[in-house]
Amino acid sequence: MYLHLGQEVVVRRRDIIGVFDIENTTVSRNTREFLNNAEKEGNVGYINYDLPKSFTVCAPTKGDLEGGNTMVYISPIAPRTLYKRSETSNI
C-alpha cells in the first residue's frame, strides 16, 4: 500500500515512521534540531513550497544501500487528511 503525500510524491505505507503536525511539534527544540539536521544532510523533500502543515518521516527502504538515510517530506496537507488517505487507500 502507498500513501500520496501531495503533488507527485507517493511513499510506501510500511516505510512511514510517523506523520506529524508541523505547527504543534516544532515548538520542541528537539524536533527543530531533527528537522535542521535532516535539512543539512539533504534528507528533506519539499512537496511544494506552500505553507507546510505536516511532515512525514520515512525509514530507508530495504533495497537501499547500507547506511540509507531517513527521509523527511514536508507537505502542505494536514496530518488528519493524510491519515484519512492512508485508511481509504487501495493503491
Image: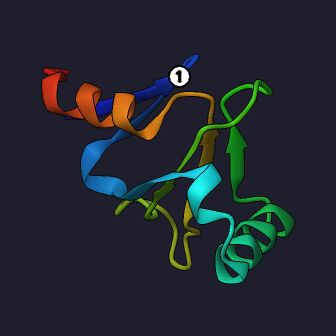
- Given residues 11 and 23, the one toward you in this image is 23
Q: Does 58 sit above or below residue 89?
A: below
Q: In this view, does 23 lie above or below 68?
A: above
Number of numbered labels in the structure image:
1
| Amino acid marked by disc 1 | Gly
Classify mark 1: residues with Cα within 10 Å, few (<14), some (14-19) or many (20+).
Answer: some
- At x 78%, y 74%, the residue is 37
The residue depicted at 69 percent of the width and 36 percent of the height is: 52
Residue 4 percent across, percent down from the top left:
40, 25
Residue at 20% from the left image edge and 21% from the top image edge: 91
Tell me the quarter of the picture where residue 28 sits: bottom right
Name the residue tied to disc 1: 6
State how the image is colored. rainbow
Kindly state the secondary structure of the residue where label 1 is placed. strand
The N terminus sits in image quarter? top left
The reply, left or right, for residue 34 in relation to residue 72 is right
Q: Residue furthest right?
A: 40
Seen in the picture, residue 10 relative to 42 is either above or below; the reply is above
